[in-house]
Image (spheres, grey):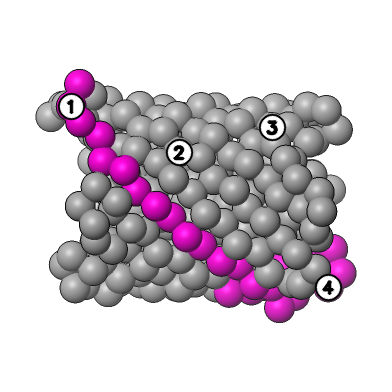
Amino acid sequence: MQRYGGWMAAAAGLGGALASGAAVSGPLPGDAYEITEAELIDRRSGTVDFWHQEVDRSEGDRVGTFGALTTRGTGDWQTTVGLGTQGTEGADANAFLDVEGLWLWRDRHRDGYGLGLAAGLDYDISDDRRRDHFLLVPLTVDWGQRTTVHANLGVSHNRQDDDTDGIWGLGLDWRFTERWDVILQATGDTDSDEDARGAFGLRRSMLDDLVQLDLAYGRVMSSGEDDEFYLGVSFDAVRF
């Protein structure tokens, strides 16, 4: 989350699927989990996610908040729109907009594995400019009865620097009790080995998995200078 991409994109995280499907998550600023799952929410439904983040940094702590709405109609695709703020603690925060889309070619429950295509862009509302764009292929497979594995491979373009890099991610969700999940992930890009980031999260599911609470911790693995702390909530909001 060097570029603050870890915050809230959706309390769904690292690949942790909602009982009804998966919420937003990806390389753009948002939540603690940067991996995109090859999993959709239920047809004709919508989920809402809220996240809060605090990052301990030697040059000044950062804080952020984020909210997102993910909707799906009757097709094999869904869209997510999110709004958030980010900035140094005690200073004016910048507002940003995330737009992401996910299409599935293979469904995990139907075909035994999930495979699709995801894309998104990040817009800085305060400075009126586009920032990061991404395009990636997400893969999700079950590993036994309690574990789900996620992999991402794609490209990200930084409009400010006019720079395009490859991006990768590996994640694992493990349901160790009926209501508790452990989430692990590692993400990075081809620009530098020093950008590799790790995240660890705990998720509590409630009300027949309609509501989920997340506590997560993230850190750039090479430097380990910044400690990232996250609190998130996700819930089914709309049926239509």
Circle 1 or circle 3, nearest the eye: 1
Q: Quadrant of residue 84 in the image?
A: top left
The residue singled out by tag 1 in the image is 91
Helix, strand or loop under label 4:
helix
User: What element does badge 1 sit on?
Assistant: loop
Q: Nearer the viewer, mark 4 or mark 1?
A: 1
Residue type, label 1:
Ala
Q: Which residue is mark 3?
A: 212
Residue shown at 33%/58% (left/top)?
Answer: 123
Mark 1 or 3 closer to N-term?
1
Q: Is residue 219 magenta?
A: no
- Mark 2 and mark 1 in contact? Answer it, CB < 8 Å: no
Q: Disc 4 or 3, which lies upstream in sequence? A: 4
- Secondary structure mostly seen in magenta is strand
Q: Nearer the viewer, residue 132 or 228?
A: 132
Query: Disc 2 versus disc 1: distance between alpha carbons?
Result: 17 Å
3D distance between C-alphas at marks 4 and 1: 50 Å
Q: Tell which circle, 4 or 2, labels the residue nearer the N-terminal end.
A: 2
Graded by Cα atoms within 10 Å as few (under 14), some (14 to 19) or many (20 or more), the crowding at tag 1 reads few
Mark-to-mark CA distance, 1 and 3: 31 Å
Cα–Cα gap, marks 4 and 3: 26 Å
Element under label 2? strand
Q: Nearer the viewer, residue 34 or 237?
A: 237
Residue 28: name its quadrant: bottom left
Residue at mark 4 to residue at mark 2: CA–CA distance:
34 Å
Q: Which residues are magenta?
A: 90-117
